[in-house]
Image (cartoon, rainbow, N blue to C red):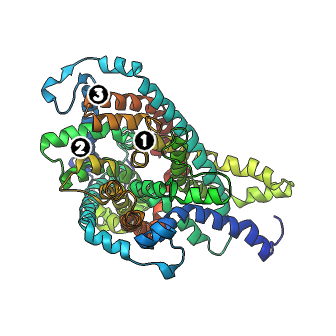
Amino acid sequence: MSVSAALPDHAAPARRWRNRLLPYGLLTPAVLVTVVIVFLPMIEAVVTSLYEFVLFRPNAARFVGLGNYFKLVEDPVFWITLKHTAIWIGLTVPLQMGLGLIAALILNRQFPWRGIARALVIIPWALPSVVIALMWRWIYDANTGVLNEILLRLSIIQSAVPWLADPDRALYAVVVTLTWQGFPFFAVMILAGLQGIPKSRYEAASIDGASAWRQFRHVTLPGIAGVLATAGLLRIIWVANSIDVIFVMTGGGPGYATQTLPLYAFVKARQNLDFGYGTTIAVMFTLLLSVVVAFYIARTSNEAER
Amino acid sequence: MMGKPTMMRRILTTDLPALGIVLLAVGPFLWMLMTSFTPQDRLAALGVAISPANWSLENYLRLVSRTSFLGNMGHSLIVAAGTTVLGLFVSVTAAYAFSRFRFAGRRVLMMQFLLVNMFPVVLLILPLFIMMRRLGLLDTHAALIIANATVAIPFSIWMLTSYINAIPRSLDEAAMTDGCSRLQALRRVILPLAMPGIISTGIYIFITAWNEYLYALTLGGRNVRTVTVAIQTLIGEYQIEWGLLSAGGVVGALPATILFLIAQRRLIGGLTQGAVKG
């Protein structure tokens, strides 16, 4: 204890005890609150998933053991939404990262209005999801949306496309929206990583005659690899969890075209009030996601050591 | 290096791409802004008015007179402010403990708070609904504040810990040799010094709580309807009146966006620190 070492003479035993208990005392409110509002509900979720429980028939709740889980693996919609979740994460996160990287490389250059540019680029991140969903519904609007208008003028499409109503296109349309929402996060993280690379490395590389591409490959990329990995993991978790934008944009439709696993859980419980089954889906989703979370925690736990 | 780039060259390789990225980021919002200034008749006949000469506040006036939007803003304000107070109140002492003490279980507890942040909202939202119903808290501000705290507390603990880590320990020790107790040192020395960090964290909590939608939708109701839920309801009620909807979107997004722009420098510092070091 480096702290008590500073005052050795008046550190009476009683005081030392108090000092030892103090951190726990300081943590108690935060821990108590999280136990009550996170861990208890989580346990309750696991318990609920073992019941057949429909909200408007509370007395008919019936213990079914793992019954809901057996039902889940046989549910074709589960597999459809799982596939969508994979596409959803597999497209959105790399796209966000790629666009974020480009944005960061540009914003890392010297130009007079750099400060303003950096502030403006992050705006999508600060907007409410509902507003983002509203905005993009308007952009995608089949009759008067600006996207159709632009594409029609450029003759890329011949007739207006109902982006969000077309089962083959809706999921990709939402992916584009999420990419737009999330790329600033990567840009900011990568920018911070870029600034951590010592200038001398670039100077050494250019003395060795390395081309711009080789400098990027051998100095920049290794320099931001750690940031990319951490931010990527964080983003996978975040994108997987985020259902509000899809919910407002399409509600999971048309049909199940844009339904991801967590959205399926939410809709099942909200519309059918089938809390038992909805919670089962949520628990299953959490288990699948926990693989990614484990990676992230392992990466970050070194941080807490210090 | 490539030698001194000329002005023209800098514009082509740097300013233009930067402008492109900025437009990509703010374009959709600008489009919504222009839509909101376009009167409904014009929007239906000619589309969005690009030139300010054709703009009017008609949509905003209708928004205020025809919908309960101002009341919804009030509810959002109460919920966001409440979450901020609750979140900061329990996080400051926790962050101080994590920063200044090395004790058994520290690592596990810190990881616990990180883990909590990763829990899917969808897992917590159903049991929280059942819990709030049992407690009779559905459709109250308290329910939303408590639910938002599930996100706010873990995050602000981590953010504040890194801010307090940046304050030298010698300062608390000096205060304690001068006769302060631990808690007095926290209150008189650390709190004032950490104030910028606490304010940024508070702003961050406020923004996330203001923008929150799923909890507000599920745990709120007729009495407590926040802006985000109100916007969603507007979409249902005024399907094709994009001018009015856009005005709602702009007003709903404004408080969080302005706060963010004011605090962005410091916020970004706090947010990126963890990821860059880790």
Disc sitting over residue A32 in the figure: 2
Q: Could you tell me how far apart the alpha carbons at marks 2 and 1 are, in whole angstroms?
A: 25 Å
Q: Position of residue A203 (x, y in %)?
A: 78, 60
Q: Position of residue A152 (x, y in %)?
A: 63, 57
Residue at position x 39%, y 49% in the image: A248
In this rendering, do the residues under marks 2 and 1 share a single chain?
Answer: yes
Q: Mark 1 belongs to which subunit?
A: A
Residue at position x 41%, y 54% in the image: A129
Question: Mark 2 belongs to which amino acid?
Answer: Leu
In terms of secondary structure, where does tag 3 sit? helix
Q: Position of residue A104 (x, y in %)?
A: 63, 58
Mark 1 residue crowding within 10 angstroms, few (<14) / some (14–19) / many (20+): many
Query: For this view, does A209 lie left or right of residue B108?
Result: right
In terms of secondary structure, where does tag 1 sit? helix
Disc sitting over residue A241 in the figure: 1
Q: Is residue B249 visible?
A: yes
Q: Nearer the viewer, mark 3 or mark 2?
A: 3
Contact between labelled residues 1 and 2, with CB atoms less than 8 Å apart: no
Q: Is residue A281 above or below residue B92?
A: above
Q: Which residue is mark 3?
A: A46
First in residue order: circle 2 vs circle 1: 2
Q: Is residue B218 above or below residue B39?
A: above
Question: Mark 3 belongs to which amino acid?
Answer: Val
Mark 2 residue crowding within 10 angstroms, few (<14) / some (14–19) / many (20+): few
Name the foreground residue: A138 vs A11. A138
